[in-house]
Image (cartoon, grey):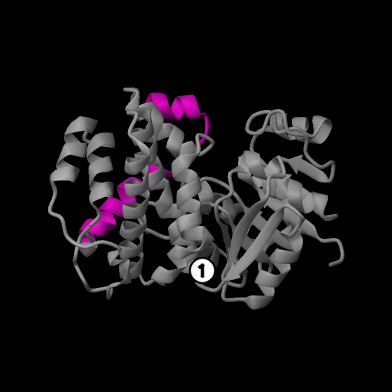
Amino acid sequence: MTGKIVAVIGGGSFGTAVADIIASNGHEVRQWMRDEALAESINNCHINTTYLPGYELHQGVRASTDILWATAEADVVFVSIPSSSFRSVVSTMKSVVGGKILISTTKGVEAGSFDLMSQILAEEVPTARVGVLSGPNLAKEVVAKAITATVIASADEELCQEVQLLLHSDYFRVYSNHDTYGVELGGALKNIYAIVAGLAGSLGMGENTKSMLITRALAEMSRFAVRMGANPLTFLGLSGVGDLIVTCTSPLSRNFRVGYALGQGKSLSEAEAELGQVAEGINTLRLVREKAQELQVYMPLVDGLYEIVVNQRSIREVTRELMLGEQKTDVEFILQADTQEGA
């Protein structure tokens, strides 16, 4: 592949890791961020001092607070910003990205519309070629060049191949999938269960508990996804169970760390302040619980976490209620979408 101009929208940890990979592969990378001082640090010192301190970036990454400079000449645009500001930021660049490849790496849901980020891209830039990048990808491990795999999802096969070429290296492997909605929904949903896992970790719960939570989370995610129209088999891949495992077991996971802090007795505002970054799982929790109630999808872990985070009920009390709930079937995500059996 000849050298491309690639824009990365967002100055956070994963956007920066993606920028580093692409620049290392010989492409010109223009990274947009709001923070002028951070942009200067990347340009002069080649370090994202806020989100990835201690990791030197490829010198081919150039940063700016001018979003039109970053995107106007770009062949491919990766959008790596929090879901709460996703639509507004995309709107500011939509005049120059029509017809281009736009890839979302954001794992979240928009309030009000329940749109996933790829749907926002399609709505704001109807002529764009849209894809989603998602998988078990902790940014610090990616930028440290630990062996990692991810998924590019799109109905556009040529788009998938182009993104695979942009990102593939001896430590970063990119698989393709055409179930864009399922891949993206999995990435958003798993953040909820990472908070649950963090809570369990802070309370000293054992390996049996962790295994139960991850397995039940996968079934719960799949049950919801089927009702929303996704392919449940997508959840058996990297963007489903793979992402779920890493985010539920690693202290590098932002959502896991929020859950851990909550389990230590800290308030939600204290936990988020300590994190210093957006934990998408809190926003997703509220939206998914509302949607699950609307669709009558049985999601006991979501309900339990909502009681703890929003209604501030005792963790021990909610856990006891979950354990005393009716025992039904296991791995029910293989059942038909209209089945209401619970876990």
Q: Quadrant of the N terminus?
A: bottom right
Q: Could you tell me the amino acid type at mark 1?
A: Thr
Relative to 176, is 274 on the left or the right? left
* Residue 291 is inside the magenta segment: yes
Q: Most prominent secondary structure in the magenta stretch?
A: helix
Looking at the image, can residue 11 be seen?
Answer: no
Q: Residues within 10 Å of mark 1 (few under 14, many from 20)?
A: many
Task: Choose top left, top right, bottom left or bottom right for residue 258.
Answer: top left
Q: Residue at x 35, y 23 (%)?
A: 264
* Residue 123 is inside the magenta segment: no
Looking at the image, can residue 20 be seen?
Answer: yes
Q: Residue at x 45, y 33 (%)?
A: 257
Q: Quadrant of the C terminus?
A: bottom left
Q: Give the percent coordinates (x, y) of residue 259.
A: 38, 34
Q: Residue at x 32, y 59 (%)?
A: 219
Question: For the magenta stretch, what is the residue range?
Answer: 268-294
| Circle count | 1
Vertically, is 203 above or below 99?
A: above
Relative to 73, is 263 on the left or the right? left
Q: Give the percent coordinates (x, y) of residue 254.
A: 49, 37
Q: Residue at x 37, y 47 (%)?
A: 211
The residue singled out by tag 1 in the image is: 180
Task: Choose top left, top right, bottom left or bottom right for residue 252.
Answer: top right
